[in-house]
Amino acid sequence: MKKLWKMRKNREAVSPVIATILMVAITVVLAAVLYVMVMGFGGGQGGQTPAITMTYLKTSAGNYTFTVAGVNKNDIKWTDLGSVIAPTGPTVTKPTTGNVGAGDIVTISGLTTGIAYTLTLKYTPTGGAAYQVNFTPTA
């Protein structure tokens, strides 16, 4: 019996209980990191600004209509898009309900001929520009 006690005393290893607890803790931490990466909480793709493509035409009344040609996400709401036109003065009219989809129309009225304008549709959840165009109204 004395020999067995001496053998245990000279071992300098981690006990099986401590080793198991450490392995479980490391596994939990790695699983949490992987979950965060996959779900986009770590600054991945979860917070990206969507992209909208539009075409525009001058109407007979001197206004410009911008028609949505495509959107890279299907669940963008019009309420999440703010419209900014610079220089200020013209009126931007866009849909107020529903999701952004092909064929939706944004109208700009009150433009002055010969002045360069910039229309920006900002995606409010990220603050980024979903659409931006520079144009100059003609006579």
Image (cartoon, rainbow, N blue to C red):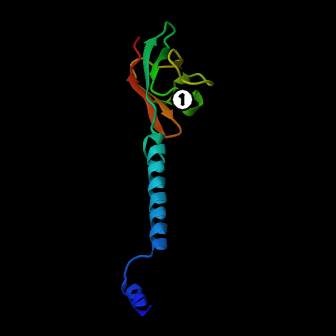
- Quadrant (top left/top right/bottom left/bottom right) for the N terminus: bottom left
Q: How many numbered markers are drawn? A: 1
Answer with left or right where residue 89 lies relative to residue 98: left
Q: Quick check: 101 above or below 80?
A: above
Classed neighbour count for the residue bearing mark 1: other residues with Cα under 10 Å, few (<14), some (14–19), many (≥20)? some
Give percent across and percent down for residue 103.
51, 14
Q: Secondary structure at mark 1?
A: loop
The residue under label 1 is 76
Q: Nearer the viewer, residue 38 or 101?
A: 38
Furthest-bottom residue in this view:
2
Give percent across and percent down for residue 131.
44, 28
Q: Nearer the viewer, residue 106 or 102?
A: 102
Task: Name the residue type under label 1.
Answer: Ile
Q: Residue at x 44, y 56 (%)?
A: 30
Q: Residue at x 53, y 17 (%)?
A: 104
Residue 30 visible, this angle: yes
Q: Nearer the viewer, residue 116 or 39?
A: 39
Furthest-top residue in this view:
60
Give percent across and percent down for residue 67.
48, 16
Give percent across and percent down for residue 113.
42, 17
Q: Residue at x 46, y 32 (%)?
A: 50
Residue 42 visible, this angle: no
Q: Residue at x 40, y 25 (%)?
A: 133
Q: Quick check: 23 above or below 92?
A: below
Q: Quadrant of residue 98?
A: top right
- Quadrant (top left/top right/bottom left/bottom right) for the C terminus: top left
Furthest-right residue in this view:
97
